[in-house]
Amino acid sequence: MTVRFCFARTLCLALILGAAGLAPALAQDDPAPPAKQQKKLPEAPAKLPKADRTKNLDFLFGALKAAPDEDSAKHVEARIWAIWLQTPSDTAALLMARAKAAVDAQKVDVAIKLLDAVIKLRPDYIEAWNRRATLYYMQNDYARSLADIREVLIREPRHFGALAGLGMIMQDVGDEKRALEAYRKALAINPHLEKIPDQVKALTEKVEGRDI
């Protein structure tokens, strides 16, 4: 496993999972910051009618692009994740909680089966597709991971985590042109994504050549 491949694994987890709470269980290469430095993310808002949810997301994505600094951007990003994480039913919430517990216990196959059940129950719930895509990626099952990322992006084309994950997979399989395209789309939505600008710069030089 190359150094770049290890980096891609960890970064993909952080971006696809976002504030989902699963990343620490699988990406243990990076130690957690001291407790006093950790900031509690905003709680998911109460369930909202679909129209209000869409309106809120539209506003937050606009605020994300206009954020004047990293701290402001991270606050807005956390609120976007909070809305994405809202479960559509009590049953889905229970299954998602059990899936997280399975991941925490390193039982990825069990977590995938639980996410299968969520998706069958509520195929409109984006986060179930997103989490399953991440777990398939960790199992090197790129075909299934890409299929789930596609489902995420059909439902939410602005899902910068899924776009970044798509870029990671494309890099892993050696399709640097498509990786660059995915990263650029992710940055167009969320200009404050960590480390992705460095990936874009490196890939631009490789794919398009250096400016003369």
Image (cartoon, rainbow, N blue to C red):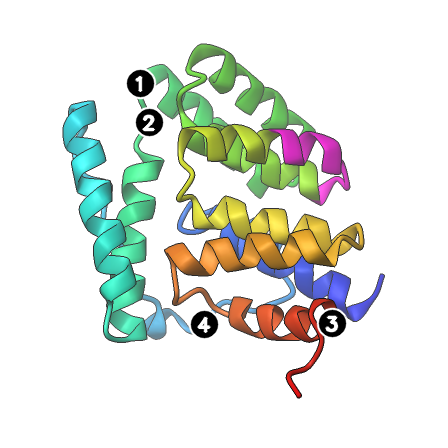
Going by the image, does 28 lie left or right of 91? right
Q: Amino acid at mark 4?
A: Pro
What secondary structure is the magenta-colored segment mainly? helix
**Residue segment shown in magenta:** 138-147
- Residue placed most toward the observer, 15 or 57: 57
Residue underneath mark 4: 33
Residue underneath mark 2: 87
Name the residue rendered at 65%, 35% in the picture: 146
Circle 4 or circle 2, nearest the eye: 2
Which of the two discs, 4 and 3, labels the residue nearer the N terminus? 4
Q: Amino acid at mark 2?
A: Thr
Q: CA distance from mark 2 to mark 1?
A: 7 Å
Which of the two discs, 4 and 1, labels the residue nearer the N terminus? 4
Q: Is residue 121 above or below residue 51?
A: above
- Estimate the x, y position of residue 6 in percent, counting from the top left: 73, 63
Going by the image, does 17 lie left or right of 8? left
Name the residue rendered at 69%, 30% in the picture: 144
User: For the N terminus, which image quadrant?
Assistant: bottom right
146 in the magenta segment: yes
Residue underneath mark 1: 90
- Estimate the x, y position of residue 30 in percent, counting from the top left: 59, 68
Q: CA distance from mark 4 to mark 2?
A: 28 Å
> Which secondary structure lies at badge 3?
helix
Q: Amino acid at mark 1?
A: Asp
Residue furthest out toward the bottom: 212
Labelled pair 2, 1 in contact (Cβ < 8 Å): yes
